[in-house]
Image (tube, coloured by chain):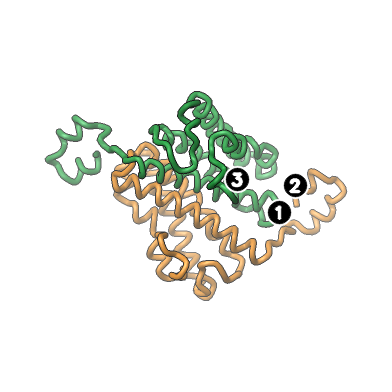
Chain colours: A orange, B green
Amino acid sequence: MKRLVKLVGGVVLVAALLPNAVAADDKEVIEYRQHIMNALNEQAAALGMIMSYAIPDDNAVAHFQAIALTAKTALKAFEPKVQGGEAKPDVWANWADFSKRMNEFAQNSEAVAKLGAAQGTEAAMQRVLDALPCKSCHDIYRTESKSKGKK
Amino acid sequence: MKRLVKLVGGVVLVAALLPNAVAADDKEVIEYRQHIMNALNEQAAALGMIMSYAIPDDNAVAHFQAIALTAKTALKAFEPKVQGGEAKPDVWANWADFSKRMNEFAQNSEAVAKLGAAQGTEAAMQRVLDALPCKSCHDIYRTESKSKGKK
């Protein structure tokens, strides 16, 4: 709404009354979180190619940093209780556990990214599972049917 | 090779003689840069949903930051002169222009991300084309056949 306020002066009062007026519909909620999880998947795949020595490691720290940043955005995208996509209903049924895992993912991946920036790629690689706990969470909270080929 | 040096002491000399010993094959080079461009595409799509008011803007600054970080990694991924994927041969035929555009994208998207972090989402949104010059570059350097549905 803030953008509308800037563009159209007349709606200032409306925006003030509705500070969180953006209401995403269910399809959009699902699509948005999929963009975030897909971004994580692409970054993890790029990092995986470096880990397996297929690609030189020039970008490794930046990949860790991008994963850490994206991890921070993921939980917010699941907050609306909208079932669908590849998310199991358990995401919301076990929200305390799901959100704990997501927050730990965000915190740990940020720590690994900082370690990489301070001490180099190799130091970060030693803690890569902290930065990429993908499978442990997907095994519980993601449906298998649509996730072939993903981590 | 550094990881091998750490794991297997006996190859220290080999690693010293071959400091850039990771030689990606052509298929891997293409796959790696696709992961990076796909990550950019997913982040841009997520940001696009916020720009169009489909999704609240809580994550907007983080999306800008992730785009800036990923943009930094993109040029390196195109340095090996390996044609294929969606990249036109012009990428390498016009490398001076392509790399200039990629570097400007990285610099400008970082500036917009910093603006967003300092002054908030709305300030960043005003300069969104600096952070997302996708189409102007894709029109020149990406094949159209495979890029349907992408920005």
Query: How far apart in space, not on screen, are marks 1 and 2 (Cα)?
Result: 9 Å
Answer with the quarter of the image where residue A21 lies: bottom right
Query: How far apart in space, not on screen, are marks 1 and 3 (Cα)?
Result: 18 Å
Given residues A111 and B143, the one toward you in this image is B143
> Does residue B62 appear in this view?
no
Q: Where is residue A104 in the image (x, y as percent from the top left)?
A: 44, 59
Q: Mark 1 points at which residue?
A: B53
* Residue found 24% across the figure and 43% down from its top: B3
Q: Which of marks 1 and 3 is in front?
A: 3
Q: Residue furthest top?
A: B96
* Residue found 39% across the figure and 55% down from its top: A132
Q: Which of marks 3 and 2 is in front?
A: 3
Q: In this view, does A11 lie to the left or right of A112?
A: right
Q: In this view, does A138 lie to the left or right of A33?
A: left
Tag shown at residue B151: 3
Q: Where is residue A60 in the image (x, y as percent from the top left)?
A: 38, 42
Question: Mark 3 Cα within 10 Å, few/some/many (few <14, many 20+)?
Answer: some
Q: Mark 3 lies on which chain?
A: B
Q: Mark 2 points at which residue?
A: A3
Q: Which residue lies furthest to the front in this view?
A: B145
Q: Which amino acid does label 1 sit on?
A: Tyr
Badge 1 vs badge 2, beta-carbon distance below 8 Å: yes
State whether residue A123 is above or below residue B98: below
- What element does badge 3 sit on? loop
